[in-house]
C-alpha cells in the first residue's frame, strides 16, 4: 500500500519522470540537466534493451526516444513499448536526426517528433504539453 502523497509505483518522489533513451552521452546529459532543472525526475538508457527494462520497471510518465541506437534501433524499441501492456500507454517523444526513417504508421504511435539539432525551449514545451507540470 502506498503512503499518502507517495507515488503508486512505490517511489516517494512524486515528480513526473522522463526516461531519456539516447546513446550520445552529451545529449543525454544535456536533456537530463534541462529537465531536472525544471523539476522532472529523469532516468537514462543508452540501448534499446535498457530502455525496455527501465520502462517496465519504473513506468515513467514520458519517454524520449532517439531512433539511432546501438544494437536495437528506436523503431524496435517503439514497437516493443507499444506492444507491451505495461508500457503501451506511456507517451513517447521521438528526438532524432533521423526522423525521416519513421513511417507514417509509426508516427501515429508517438506524441511528438522532434528533429536534431533541437531547440531546448521546444523540448521543454513538448514535455510540458505531453505530461504537464513536473509535480503530481
Image (cartoon, rainbow, N blue to C red):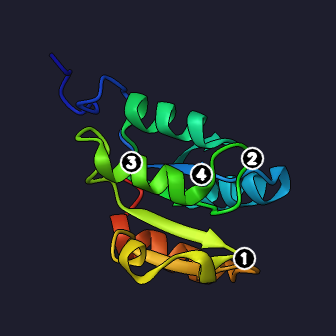
Whichever of labels 2 and 1 marks the residue nearer the N terminus, that label is 2
- Residue 27 at least partly seen: yes
Whichever of labels 3 and 2 marks the residue nearer the N terminus, that label is 2
Mark 4 surroundings: few (<14), some (14-19) or many (≥20) residues within 10 A:
many
Nearer mark to the viewer, of 2 and 4: 2
Please state the total of marks drawn on the protein image.
4
Is label 2 in a helix, a strand or a loop? loop
Is label 3 in a helix, a strand or a loop? helix
In this rendering, the answer to whether 92 lies above or below 106 is above
User: Residue 133 location, x and y as percent?
Assistant: 37, 63
In this rendering, the answer to whether 124 lies above or below 70 is below
Instruction: Give the residue number, with chain letter if any, for mark 4.
Output: 20
Q: Residue at x 63, y 54 (%)?
A: 73
Residue farthest along the top direction in this orientation? 1
Q: Residue at x 70, y 53 (%)?
A: 69
Measure the C-alpha gap from mark 3 to mark 1. 21 Å
Measure the C-alpha gap from mark 3 to mark 4. 14 Å
In this rendering, the answer to whether 56 lies above or below 80 is above
Q: Which mark is residue 70?
A: 2
Q: Nearer the viewer, residue 114 or 43?
A: 114
Q: Are marks 3 and 4 in contact (CB under 8 Å)?
A: no
Instruction: Give the residue number, with chain letter if any, for mark 3.
Output: 81
Is label 1 in a helix, a strand or a loop? loop
Whichever of labels 3 and 4 marks the residue nearer the N terminus, that label is 4
Residue 103 in the figure: left or right of residue 86: right
Q: Are marks 1 and 4 in contact (CB under 8 Å)?
A: no
Q: Which mark is residue 97?
A: 1
Measure the C-alpha gap from mark 1 to mark 4. 15 Å
Amino acid at each position: 500500500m502506498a503512503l499518502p502523497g507517495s507515488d503508486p509505483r512505490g517511489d516517494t518522489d512524486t515528480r513526473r519522470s522522463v526516461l531519456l533513451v539516447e546513446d550520445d552521452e552529451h545529449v543525454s546529459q544535456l536533456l537530463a540537466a534541462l529537465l531536472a532543472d525544471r523539476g522532472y525526475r529523469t532516468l537514462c538508457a543508452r540501448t534499446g534493451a535498457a530502455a525496455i527494462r527501465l520502462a517496465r520497471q519504473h513506468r515513467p510518465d514520458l519517454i524520449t526516444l532517439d531512433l539511432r541506437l546501438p544494437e536495437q534501433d528506436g523503431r524496435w524499441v517503439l514497437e516493443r513499448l507499444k506492444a507491451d501492456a505495461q508500457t503501451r500507454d506511456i507517451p513517447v517523444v521521438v528526438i532524432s536526426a533521423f526522423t525521416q526513417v519513421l513511417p507514417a504508421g509509426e508516427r501515429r504511435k508517438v506524441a511528438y517528433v522532434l528533429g536534431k539539432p533541437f531547440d531546448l525551449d521546444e523540448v521543454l514545451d513538448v514535455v510540458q504539453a505531453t505530461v504537464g507540470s513536473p509535480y503530481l
